[in-house]
Image: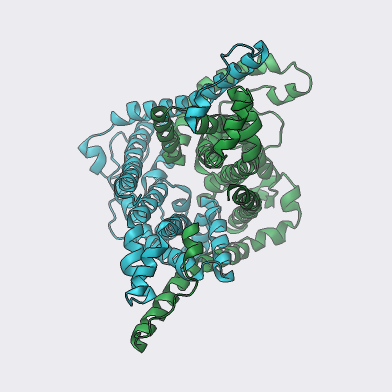
Chain colours: A cyan, B green
Amino acid sequence: MTAASHRSGARRRGISGRRRAANALFTGAVYLAVALAAVPLALLVYYVVVNGARQLSVSFLTDSLPISVRRKTGGIGPAIVGTLLCTALAALMAIPLGVLGAVYLNEYGRTSRTATTLRFLANVLAGVPSIVMGLFIYTIFVLRFQGTGRIAFAGSLALACLMLPIVIRSTEEMLRLVPANLREASMALGASQSRTILTVVLPAALPGITSGSMLAVARAAGETAPVLFTIGFATRLNWNPFSGPNTTLAQFIFSNAGQPYPAAVSRAWGAAFTLIVLVLLLTASARFIAARFSVR
Amino acid sequence: MTAIDTAPRTPARPAAATPSRRTADRVFQRMTLGAGLLVLLILALRVLSTVDQARPAFAHMGLRFFTSSRWAPPSDEYGALSFIYGTGLISLLALVLAVPVSLGIAVYLSELAPLNARRVVTVVIDLLAAVPSVVWGLWGFLVLRSPLQRFYQTLSDVLSPVPGVGKLFEGPVSGLSFATAGTILALMIIPIITSLSRDVMDTVPVAQKEAALALGATRWEMIRGAVLPYSKGGVIGAVVLGLGRAMGETIAVALVIGSSGQITSRLFAAGDALPSQIANQFNESEGLFRSALVALGVTLFFFTIVVNLAARAIVTRTNRHLKGVAL
């Protein structure tokens, strides 16, 4: 299909200068567009790497957060732990529920009114701004447990709400790609529908579901707004998601970025570098899984 | 798509199914339905709980919450108009900047790029999408601010004498401004608009493109005459989805918009938006102030819902049209 379009007629004789110029102008504009997206990304990556990599050291990655932003010392260990805790808990909640919901939509509900409505609502939920998720968990969870409500678990609830529609949508897409005759073959052998889904349909769609879920996890790991009001702020390591405040990398970057102290700004760059590496690792493994194990 | 259509709607139960297996089957179905209904539960709870928390502020201000631009927590005055204006302005700005770039990249990917370049550009777009909001904000705040301020000053010197549009560029300029927020937002929504538009452009029948070329069209004429009209609906849907995303984007905007709620046509002035005001103030607020911030969240929620529903409606309508043609 591109072979045809590549054989551009612009250079043939008989095409007026104006048309040729329009074509050249258009081609130039398209390349300019690509550059306009690529250059800022390159600059951003450059600054994060240059300013961030300089901070990295074992003590930076493991030390407690500084008690005051003015302090020269201090690391981001608790924020890394907080990010991992919140994201992992959110994934534990959102992925199984999202996959089950998608199974309902694609295997049971299909085009029924319930399924159509739920599909629509999942799209609505996907469009809700992440800060509104944070406010929501704040009003139903943090307010309910005055004083003890700001815990990592509250943050992961907000992140799970954010991930759920993404997981549902990508999983349903993957289930849709499973050929119908696999299901029919399983049924013909006498398997019940639930057994067919659990032993035939889901395994067939597993690589796609995994990569879609990991993209959702990557998105959640970098989110700040949902955890801003829900997990509090801790300077010390807290492995317990159900008690005591916690901190995530994104939140730490946000609170340090605007500080007038060079040490705080350097820490923010270091944390940004760590966060980007984390998110890219998740994204890259999602792509790898999708490419390596896809059933095509 | 076809997998669904050819699958039996209700598979016949094997005659040998024992009652216990049938129960297990039904339990599993209920479980999946329950998981699906969770979405409904979350949405319903969200609306109820946030509206409930916002009620004191709405009751205190009445309609003036939306029509007044005076936001003065110490004197319990909460008019959200300047934040609504800021959200609208930076989202529009982001669209103006992002749409041409996104369409250019989408055309490049679907029509022009050789296979290798396509792979590279796709990775670039994926990376753009993967960068967390807060990192965009950090970069905008620490790196972009001063070069942009100089750039704005030059633009302002050149363009502000122009009658009419000159008003947009009047000084004094600030590195943290509506314009900076719009620029960062544009970078953040380029991946969404690009990937959706590209998907739509890929559905243009090859026969139509080849027909245009066979009639002697240049590549640009082929794209203008065959590709763009065919994908118009889907592209509009993609743009509106991008708008919805831009409106709700919080942290990057909170860092670069300058946090000073005002209604002005000057793009280079500091402003504020709904989500950034919430993010910056919430942890220091209490009582009616906090309720007013939740009310900002409710307002934002309804705006984004409307925009997203519009986008879905456009995309669904186009899909139907596309399917009709493709089959």
The image quarter containing residue A192 is: bottom left
| Front one among A30 and B165 | A30
Tell me what residue is drawn at x 25 percent, y 41 percent. A61
Q: Measuring 59% from the left and 43% from the top, which residue is drawn there?
A: B238
View extreme (left): residue:
A58
Could you tell me residue B198's position as x and y percent?
53, 38
Q: Where is residue A18 in the image (x, y as percent from the top left)?
A: 67, 13
Relative side of A235 to A1, left or right? left
Location of residue A4 in the rendering, given as x and y in whole percent from the top left corner:
51, 28
Q: Hey, which residue is sitting farthest bottom in the picture? A: B19
Looking at the rendering, which quadrant does residue B271 occupy? Answer: top right
Residue B88 is left or right of residue B1, and the answer is right
Q: Is residue A276 above or below residue B25?
A: above
Image side of residue B319 versus residue B134, left or right:
right
In the displayed structure, A77 sits above or below A195; it is above
Residue A68 visible in rendering: yes
Residue B84 location (% of width, % of height): 67, 45
Whether residue A259 appears in this view of the structure is no
